[in-house]
């Protein structure tokens, strides 16, 4: 039986894709290599969102080539899609498969193993895709949490972003297929399902008949045995009255939202071509926090976008300080060839970008600590994960996306427990099973 080793870089969506590829390969009799075993085929699912991501792609491709000498190396994902010739020129790479052809990997791997692959680069125009190619559910992992891709591609063209070129236009899974998949995941023992997509809020706009994320959630919240439905990332403009109603009223929707901000300056938001203003964002965040007490609210922020001045940055600082964030993901701007921002003037130097990043990350740490401190003394529903931390403690996840360390036996893994939060520090949040 041939063996495969898989590696994933980048976003959660890439991880979901890799798990689906793994399940499809195993259904063909291609076994995942165990630790220490040399694989016959290596598949690297790449990211291209920043220059640092591409550097990591290269390192992983080289490292896996050393770990699995003689293996056939397949590179897929976003970097393979946007720069296939460069990827194909890397030493040891046998096959480059773009995102448009990722669903063909089981056939391509079989052909590669038997020497029947005629082309080394298979990268079709992802912009021509109108549907999501059928892929199996991620293989059962015994995990309490599951991730389900319901949408692919993006309906926007932000100035700094390469993702539309890498993943194409927005397209959605049929609602019936999503509902069926969630039922199967719950039957397999998953307590939580996270719905993922590149532009999740655009779900259903491309389907006929047209539907929406709100309509889908109205059905999913009634699935028996499902504790949490978690949403990946949503732009502010997608919060219609219908979506607000289901997100704030249903106990099955996890009290955790990730709403990208990117900048608190309207001038920079216009340069970025973001479809909202700082005041729109603030009004939404404050309304959500009032409607869903204890909401975990996260955001992405880009610092040093071309044209960002000191006053623009201070506007971002002021907005973030004023809003009830529980965590921040802060990124310095990274040029992406082929994007509008890459040709913009008024660049911000690396030293300033680093200073701004550090300042926002410190604010994010402070807000996260305050959010976790406020949980101390409360009792939370916690999904106990299938792992332990470095100190040997169990790790659980609250609905509002806080990891809690607690003592207990392995038999508690993959269960839902009521946990009393007993303490918080810079490094962790602690709890104990409530009586």
Image (cartoon, rainbow, N blue to C red):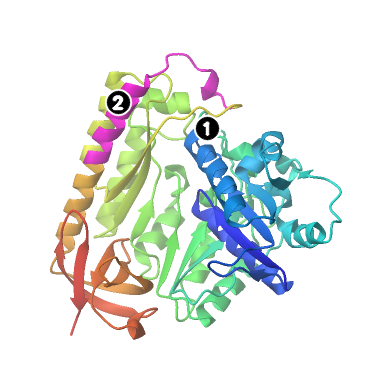
Q: Is residue 57 left or right of residue 28?
A: left
Tell me the quarter of the image containing the N terminus. Answer: bottom right
Q: Does residue 373 appear in the picture of this structure?
A: yes
For label 2, the residue is 313
Identify the residue shown where x is 86% and y is 48%: 118
Q: Calculate the distance from the C-alpha at mark 2 to the C-alpha at mark 1.
A: 19 Å
Which element is circle 2 on? helix
Please report the bounds of the magenta region as a residue range: 339-362
* Magenta residue check for 353: yes
Counting from the top left corner in percent of width and height, residue 69 is at 65, 55
For label 1, the residue is 158
Q: Does residue 323 appear in the picture of this structure?
A: no
Q: Residues within 10 Å of mark 2 (few under 14, many from 20)?
A: many
Which element is circle 1 on? loop
Counting from the top left corner in percent of width and height, residue 129 is at 73, 47
The prevailing secondary structure element of the residues shown in magenta is helix
Counting from the top left corner in percent of width and height, residue 422 is at 14, 69
Counting from the top left corner in percent of width and height, residue 33 is at 61, 68
């Amino acid at each position: 039986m041939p063996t495969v080793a898989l590696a994933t870089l980048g976003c959660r969506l890439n991880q979901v894709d890799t798990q689906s590829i793994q399940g499809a390969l195993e259904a063909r009799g291609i076994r995942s290599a165990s630790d220490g075993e040399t694989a016959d085929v290596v598949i690297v699912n790449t990211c291209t969102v920043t220059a640092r991501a591409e550097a990591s792609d290269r390192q992983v491709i080289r490292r896996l080539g050393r770990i699995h000498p003689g293996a056939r190396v397949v590179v897929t994902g976003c970097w393979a899609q946007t720069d296939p010739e460069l990827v194909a020129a890397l030493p040891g790479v046998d096959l480059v498969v773009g995102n448009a052809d990722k669903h063909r990997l089981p056939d391509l791997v079989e052909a590669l193993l038997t020497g029947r692959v005629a082309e080394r680069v298979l990268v079709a125009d992802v912009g021509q895709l109108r549907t999501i190619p059928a892929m199996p559910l991620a293989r059962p992992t015994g995990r309490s949490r599951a991730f389900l891709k319901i949408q692919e591609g993006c309906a926007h063209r932000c100035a700094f972003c390469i993702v539309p070129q890498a993943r194409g236009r927005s397209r959605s899974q049929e609602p019936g297929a999503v509902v069926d998949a969630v039922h199967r995941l719950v039957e397999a023992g998953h307590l939580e399902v996270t719905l993922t997509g590149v532009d999740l809020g655009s779900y259903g706009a491309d389907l006929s008949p047209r539907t929406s994320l709100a309509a889908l959630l109205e059905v999913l919240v009634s699935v028996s045995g499902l504790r949490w439905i978690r949403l990946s990332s949503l732009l502010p403009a997608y919060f219609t009255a219908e979506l607000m109603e289901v997100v704030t009223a249903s106990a099955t929707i996890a009290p955790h939202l990730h709403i990208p901000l990117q900048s608190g300056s309207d001038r920079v938001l216009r340069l970025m071509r973001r479809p909202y203003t700082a005041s729109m964002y603030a009004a939404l965040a404050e309304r959500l926090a009032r409607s869903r007490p204890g909401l975990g609210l996260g955001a992405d922020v880009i610092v040093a976008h071309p044209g960002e001045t000191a006053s623009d940055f201070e506007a971002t600082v002021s907005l973030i300080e004023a809003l009830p964030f529980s965590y921040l993901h802060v990124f310095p701007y990274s040029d992406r060839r082929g994007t509008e921002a890459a040709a913009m003037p008024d660049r911000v130097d690396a030293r300033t970008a680093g200073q701004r990043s550090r300042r926002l990350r410190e604010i994010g740490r402070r807000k996260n600590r305050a959010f976790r401190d406020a949980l101390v003394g409360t009792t939370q529903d916690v999904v106990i994960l299938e792992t332990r931390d470095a100190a040997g403690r169990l790790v659980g996840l609250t609905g509002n996306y806080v990891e809690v360390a607690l003592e207990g036996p392995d038999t508690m893994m993959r269960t839902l427990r009521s946990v009393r939060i007993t303490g918080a520090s810079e490094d962790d949040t602690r709890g104990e099973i409530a009586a």
